[in-house]
Amino acid sequence: QQPVQSPQAVILREGEDAVINCSSSKALYSVHWYRQKHGEAPVFLMILLKGGEQKGHEKISASFNEKKQQSSLYLTASQLSYSGTYFCGTESLDSSYKLIFGSGTRLLVRP
Amino acid sequence: NAGVTQTPKFQVLKTGQSMTLQCAQDMNHEYMSWYRQDPGMGLRLIHYSVGAGITDQGEVPNGYNVSRSTTEDFPLRLLSAAPSQTSVYFCASRTGGSNQPQHFGDGTRLSIL
């Protein structure tokens, strides 16, 4: 079951914040976040495991609400380099070998 | 380290032709996967493998075959190409355990006329 991402697209001014959400109808073991630039392969950002942890990577952080099977990616003080498409990938408890991705959130940061 | 290597980078086929997309990784990863990405869309899982000799279907397996005879290689075969299979194909690998990141190859851009 493909996770659902929202919003589908976001336009920001440099320095603004954004939140990207990812939700699943299945019980999850982990949530992965990746960023893809146009014409390139997806690049790993972070992984959150069952247990409801929160992780950070520079000005990008994420949380995982195990009870709601939801994860959120927080982009603070956005930079031009943050532009791209963000994908969440989920592993469910009943099929932890498969990493299934959402349809993505397009983020454009303008000067 | 080369990481995940996909060949070819570009390919044009005619409807009905067959071909194999190659994928090799040099990181000794147990898990390997194939995804397709249509324009403006997300990544859809075609097939995956958790080790040599073990493969399973993903979300969109029809029209594709895979095999995994070695840890390093995971080729994807299109048996009879159709225009609906025009897409960018990504191979990915990761070591076992859900706290490990997945590494992607650069992709193969496939057009079927």
Image: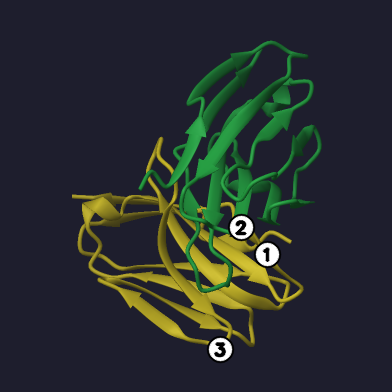
Chain colours: A yellow, B green
The residue shown at (62%, 44%) is: B35
How many circles with numbers are drawn on the protein? Answer: 3
Subunit of mark 2? B
Mark 1 Cα-neighbour bin, 10 Å: few <14, some 14–19, many ≥20? some
Q: Nearer the viewer, mark 1 or mark 3?
A: 1
Instruction: Indicate the quadrant where residue B21 lies.
Output: top right
Helix, strand or loop status at disc 3: loop
- Is label 3 or label 2 in front? 2
x%, y% of residue A59? 26, 71
Residue at image point 50% right, 22% down = B10
Which residue: 63% across, 42% down?
B74
Q: Chain of mark 1?
A: A
Q: Amino acid at mark 2?
A: Tyr
Q: Which residue is mark 1?
A: A97
Pick whichever, A47 or B2, lies toward us.
B2
Q: Position of residue B81 (x, y in %)?
A: 74, 21
Residue A19 occupies quadrant: bottom left
The residue to which callout 3 is attached is A51
